[in-house]
Image (cartoon, rainbow, N blue to C red):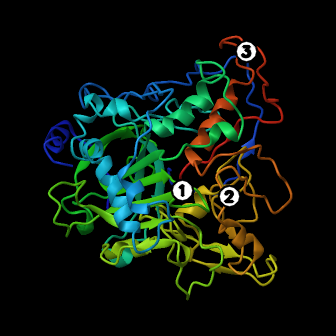
Amino acid sequence: MFKSKPLKPLAYSLILLIPFFWYSCSQKKEEYKAENLTTPKPEIKLKPFAENNGVYPPDSIYSGPFFKANYDYPESVAQKIYPWETITDGNPISKENASEYIMSIREYIYDAMSVMINEPKKWPSSIYRKEWYNMAWSAQAYKKTKWEGLETVYGTMTGQVLKNDIFKDYGFEGPMQNHALVYYNDIASLTLNELWKKNDTSGFYPEYTTEAAQFKQNAIIIKAAGTTATGEDWDIMEGAGTFPIYREMAYGPEKDNGPILQELAWIQFDIIIKDTVAAPETGWVFSTFIYDKESDGKTTFDRLELLGVSWGNDPGQLDTTKAISQTYLNPDAPDYYKANIGYGERLSGPIDVAMVGGIKSDGTPDSVFILDEAGKPQGGKSYLHFRASACMSCHGTATFPPQNDFYPSPKQNLVYTDTLYNPSSKGWSNYYQNRAGNEIMPALDGKQKSIMALDYDLFMQFALNNSRLSGNYNDKPEKPEGYNELDHKKYPALLMPRSK
């Protein structure tokens, strides 16, 4: 069984010579709890635009470079014709041209992303780094909301612990955890500027409106994820480049011992683009690339091969025995993707936990209960594993305040639950609809709490929740004239779940 280990100084110096990502749905059977987080003297000085979470490793094990978030959002971006626009030629994409479409986008961002993946030591000072931006209210750690911030070494956020048996059929049995980076391109950052700086450049007075949360055409968001299971532990990751992070371990002998320098292997890279021409029903195209040791690529980034592309939820096809039309899967993708592919062969990457349930890191089973078709427990059944989610169904829940689980569950305000709707029910189909990014996904229990649709961006949902910590915070600029502040008692910061 794989046992994570701290990265020793010599080992770190060696991996820098090796050529070496919104956010997935965290797991924990714990409800969001609306608590009164209005203490006038918080434990920390709130910094909407913090550089990172402030937890640095000692010089004896790592002395830099360090991650510093980039909030220098542009206020305008010159218009131009992009390569993928010539591929769509004014038409929606299809299975026939989805690969060509997304590969043209990958090629467009290739120079920057290849440095980020292949040369981690060079990335922080790279000429490309300033062209990729970070989300406000995400870098700092907040105990009140259990948000761990972006770590100091490579700017990753803590991801899921995958169950011991998820990749059992693919040569790995044991827990693994992923950690991911999220970056926004210049066009995407126009929205971040509108959301966080329109009313006041301090970030303390966000524009809490659906309109402010909408991304512009050709906005690109990337997520790059590494796993604690490196090539030493899992044959599938052989030859994968690595990068360092400074985080606590979620399992194993180092758990609860504080942060350690860890060595992660690149396993997944996602490109998400706002394109209402290519995807008129949702406005977004999602894509995932995964590590393929059999690839002919010369570098790790080159060996991140296309898994698939998705531009809709196929709402008319919930029968898993029939083909869907709004997802393309690469027939040559490495087989291990099948462990966590989405519901009905919808797109989901290896670290995205579309498959719920399984054996936990302590060896105990963690089953999921499926209600009957009438939504009642009487005729329901428990399963050790159940395929329940996909990229677009999960991100379609992005609203503020949150009012739906990331998974098809009757419980509100959960990120992971042990109770799911039946796939034949209205509750399940509510998750597999094609909605525009400015449309709030309804809560079927009638408790409609959301006031903002967040255009498929769950990272924005977490950041907006963190921003509510400033409700009764005194050490901030005076409220801008005419600013309509949200009622802090009605819209408090919520306790967010941690990965289990």
Q: Is residue 1 visible?
A: no
| Viewer-side label of 1, 3 | 1
Distance CA(mark 1)–CA(mark 3): 35 Å
Task: Read off the residue under disc 2.
Answer: 405
In screen coordinates, is 492 left or right of 177? Answer: right
Neighbour tally class for label 2: few under 14, some 14-19, many 20 plus, Cα within 10 Å? many
Q: Nearer the viewer, residue 45 or 85?
A: 85
Three-letter amino acid code at the position of disc 2: Asp
Give how far across and how far down residue 326 sits, in percent.
53, 72
Q: Secondary structure at mark 1?
A: strand
Three-letter amino acid code at the position of disc 1: Trp
Q: Secondary structure at mark 2?
A: loop
Distance CA(mark 1)–CA(mark 2): 21 Å
In screen coordinates, is 344 left or right of 179? Answer: right
Task: Read off the residue under disc 3.
Answer: 479
Neighbour tally class for label 1: few under 14, some 14-19, many 20 plus, Cα within 10 Å? many
Task: Read off the residue under disc 1.
Answer: 284
